[in-house]
């Protein structure tokens, strides 16, 4: 019984396979013999306008398959004249949308047969070739675009990206030079050129040098170059560049910052200070004022630095930072001028520094607490006041008694007083 069932099932399965093969062959034959209907109205004339209209509607509706079929019908029916070659652009883009890049390649080239100088077709052909990783054809289309319009930034950018993607850095540099000749300020081109230099083992700052040498009146070019030199610790050369730029704009804020930085790196703070002070008088910036104070501390021009910190404090902003800087300056002042054993007037200056650290802490600069507490052993005590200033309710380090005690006027400019602790 089982044997006959197996035979029966085998016969049924064979019949099904034969029928499937027949239907498959029929479908193939149907596809082979099918031809688009050109006269859909049966009026004896091809309906070209309708095919092109349907294709346009499908394109706008993003029905790319429908768009392809309508344009294929229009082509088959001979509807495409020289004036209608634009359809190959939309047909090619539709092929790209459905992933048929080979067909898109064919379509764009068909359009170019009608107009070999159509920049739009060339651009899409280049784009499609890029998707196909066909570098040779992509470069051909881009080069054609540049032959037609040498100032075509889009074509130049595509060529640059192609060279970059394929690590053709020497070729990339050539096209970047062309790009920067047309658009010298283009940040992408500048960045890519520096990257190409780096990939080739060249100095990236040579890009900045070339730009500046092409126009030495251009402050931005020169400053980019000078900053690059400073990064490489070539401060002397950076100063030479800055001095040339100062001829064109002696009050440029960025330029004054750069040249002062170069001098500071060379430990020539006195020269840095003249540019920083000029900057401080132009740029009403707290950080600039505090930078000036830093330089003044390093070259022991304490009075000048103190005045710049006070100018920063007068802004009423970043008070914690400002008080902290003034305290640092006063500590440095004492350490520079103190006696072998701390005298009363030295301790008065430490009192003022303690007050500034405390104000800094109260203003939210939390690190100041540590520095304030470190001064507890150096500030005046009740005994100091009893022995040295018993007659005063308050006294300043600039007091005549301090000048006599110190034997110098090192504290004479300090205009603050310390209250008695008796």
Image (cartoon, helix red, strand yellow):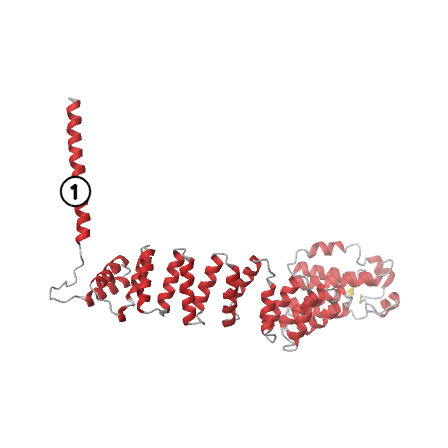
Q: Residue at x 87, y 65 (%)?
A: 406
User: 3 or 191: nearer the eye?
Assistant: 3
What is the quadrant of residue 333 in the picture? bottom right
Drawn side of residue 399 relative to residue 232, left or right? right
What is the quadrant of residue 86 in the picture? bottom left
Q: Position of residue 248 (x, y in %)?
A: 63, 78
Q: Residue at x 24, y 67 (%)?
A: 80
Drawn side of residue 210 relative to residue 66, left or right? right
Drawn side of residue 380 relative to residue 368, left or right? right
Label 1 crowd (10 A; few <14 / some 14-19 / many >=20) = few
What is the quadrant of residue 146 in the picture? bottom left
Q: Secondary structure at mark 1?
A: helix
Q: Is residue 387 visible?
A: yes
Quadrant location of the C terminus?
bottom right
Residue lying furthest left = 43
User: 392 or 320: nearer the eye?
Assistant: 320
Residue lying furthest top = 1
User: 138 or 96: nearer the eye?
Assistant: 138
Q: Is residue 318 visible?
A: no
Q: Pointer 1: what residue?
A: 22
Establish if 16 lies above or below 212: above
Q: Position of residue 418 (x, y in %)?
A: 78, 64
Residue lying furthest bottom = 248
Q: Position of residue 74 (x, y in %)?
A: 22, 63
Quadrant location of the N terminus?
top left
């Amino acid at each position: 019984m089982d044997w006959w069932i197996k035979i029966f099932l085998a016969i049924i399965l064979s019949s099904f396979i034969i029928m499937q093969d027949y239907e498959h062959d029929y479908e193939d034959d149907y596809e082979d013999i099918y031809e688009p209907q050109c006269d859909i109205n049966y009026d004896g004339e091809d309906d070209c306008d309708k095919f092109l209209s349907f294709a346009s509607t499908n394109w706008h509706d993003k029905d790319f398959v429908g768009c392809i079929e309508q344009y294929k019908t229009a082509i088959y029916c001979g509807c495409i004249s020289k004036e209608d070659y634009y359809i190959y652009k939309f047909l090619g883009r539709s092929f790209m949308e459905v992933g048929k890049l080979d067909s898109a390649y064919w379509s764009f080239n068909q359009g170019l047969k009608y107009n070999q100088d159509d920049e739009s077709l060339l651009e899409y052909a280049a784009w499609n070739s890029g998707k196909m990783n066909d570098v040779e054809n992509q470069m051909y289309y881009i080069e054609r675009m540049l032959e037609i319009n040498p100032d075509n930034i889009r074509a130049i950018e595509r060529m640059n990206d192609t060279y970059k993607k394929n690590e053709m850095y020497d070729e990339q540099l050539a096209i970047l030079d062309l790009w920067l000749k047309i658009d010298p300020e283009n940040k992408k081109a500048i960045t890519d050129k520096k990257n190409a230099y780096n990939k080739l083992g060249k100095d990236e700052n040579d890009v900045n040098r070339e730009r500046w040498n092409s126009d030495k009146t251009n402050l931005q070019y020169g400053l980019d170059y000078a900053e690059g030199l400073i990064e490489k610790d070539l401060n002397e050369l950076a100063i030479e560049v800055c001095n040339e730029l100062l001829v064109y704009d002696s009050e440029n804020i960025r330029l004054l910052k750069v040249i002062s930085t170069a001098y500071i790196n060379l430990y020539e703070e006195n020269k840095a200070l003249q540019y920083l002070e000029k900057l401080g008088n132009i740029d009403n910036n707290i950080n600039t004022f505090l930078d000036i104070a830093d330089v003044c501390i390093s070259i022991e021009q304490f009075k000048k630095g103190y005045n710049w910190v006070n100018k920063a404090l007068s802004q009423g902003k970043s008070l914690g930072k400002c008080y902290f800087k003034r305290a640092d300056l006063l500590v440095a002042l004492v350490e520079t001028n103190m006696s072998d054993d701390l005298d009363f007037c030295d301790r008065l200056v430490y009192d003022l520094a303690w007050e500034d650290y405390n104000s800094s802490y109260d203003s939210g600069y939390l690190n100041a607490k540590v520095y304030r507490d470190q001064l507890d052993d150096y500030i005046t005590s009740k005994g100091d006041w009893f022995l040295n200033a018993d007659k005063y309710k308050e006294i300043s380090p600039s007091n005549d008694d301090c000048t006599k005690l110190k034997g110098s006027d090192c504290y004479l400019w300090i205009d603050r007083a310390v209250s008695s602790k008796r």
